[in-house]
Amino acid sequence: MNCLICKVREADFKGSHIIPHFIIAPGISDGSTTRDIEQSFRIDGTGSDFSFGRSVLPEALEDTLGRPVTDEEIENNEHHYVRDDIYCTQTEVQLSKFESLYNNQVSPPLLNAVTLSDDLKRVAHFFWLSIILRCSVVEFNGFKLAPDLEQEVSDEVNAVLAESESEIRQKCLAQPLTRNIFIGYTGEPEDFTRNFTLLHPNKKSPYLLIINNYVIIYDYSNNNQLTDILNEMGATTPVAYVTGTIIHHFSESDRNSIIRYCAAIGADQFIVTTKASFEEAFFHNRQSMPTPQQISDFFTELLHHDDSLLPTVRYDASRVKELIQKHSQPA
Ligand SMILES: [Zn+2]
């Protein structure tokens, strides 16, 4: 298979991060910034899934899971954000240079709420386009750009990738901006357990990606479209609208609203897909659709629980599957 970014060379690199480690790091466990001692959770339609870096201490995992980790889990551990054979080595090197450029020059002023220079705004613009592209080409958490747009973004990202940070910076400055991007920043979280990745499954115009303390809104064409989506998330800090790139600092209360918004979207996704899986299994086992009462019975057991059951256990994909089987068996 060819590299999903350059589309020219063989995709031979092992262990590529879809979302760079330093972006997802605040959402992992205790905020550790070291690779391989990371724990992260993902909730999607099939329930929660647990993934951990190779050197997480078993005791730390046990605390999170509420039970000892199994050998099989260690064996099957596939980091949520890592894939093999999606990029070629050259592209991987260029992407990592882009990450360093962003982390060295854009992250510090963002962290300190200092206004970015126009040059750095441009670097941020194309950096986030590269993340959007990386998520889209592997359909990360179901996120996919429209095909024409993916091609356009791919062309733009390939036009700025280069072998050195200074060269990438130069290319970003030379590359025209074609669509609008909003880069919202919520500041460093006080509580690292409240971080997550939500690539909105249905929003296409504009696209919405919430990755830890970043909110990325891409391809809106006017202030109303942007304001609507910010209102939907409950964000109230005034935004100064410009075309091209907007860098925005959210307030702490906006951050809390955004977290509630993500939790609601995640819960909706979970309920919809779990109900569909239950109906499918029920029909397969009993050749009829479940009654509303049968659906209700299934969800009652799944969602209402002994308080001692940790959420990581309650929504574990294998528990969801077990309950689907139990409630779809012929009476
Ligand atoms: Zn490549």
Image: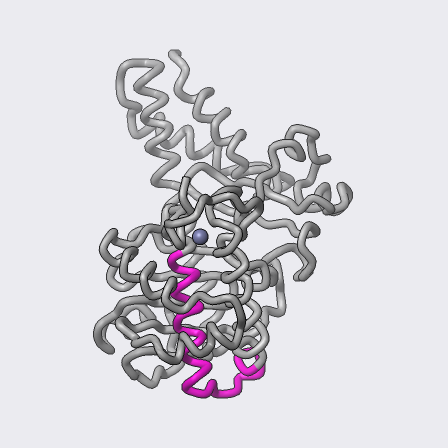
Magenta residues span 109-133
Q: Residue at x 50, y 38 (%)?
A: 304
Q: Quadrant of the N terminus?
A: top left
- Give the tally of numbered discs: 0
Q: Residue at x 52, y 41 (%)?
A: 48
Horizontal relation, residue 325 to residue 108: left or right: left
Describe the colour scheme in one phrase.
one colour
**Above or below for 117 versus 293:** below
Q: Position of residue 223 (x, y in %)?
A: 24, 78
Q: Position of residue 283 (x, y in %)?
A: 30, 19
**Above or below for 173 versus 283:** below
Q: Residue at x 45, y 87 (%)?
A: 117
Q: Quadrant of the C terminus?
A: top left
Magenta-drawn stretch, dominant element (helix, strand or loop): helix
Residue 41 magenta: no
Q: Position of residue 119 (x, y in %)?
A: 43, 84
Please state which of residues 75 and 122 is positioned toward the viewer in this rendering: 122
- Name the quadrant containing residue 133: bottom left
- Name the quadrant containing residue 128: bottom left
Evaluate whether residue 111 shows in this view: yes
Q: Position of residue 162 (x, y in %)?
A: 47, 67
Please state which of residues 211 and 265 is positioned toward the viewer in this rendering: 211
**Above or below for 143 versus 22:** above
Horizontal relation, residue 300 to residue 33: left or right: left
Residue 114 magenta: yes
Q: Residue at x 44, y 76 (%)?
A: 123
Evaluate whether residue 141 shows in this view: no
Please state which of residues 46 and 100 is positioned toward the viewer in this rendering: 100
Horizontal relation, residue 301 to residue 56: left or right: left
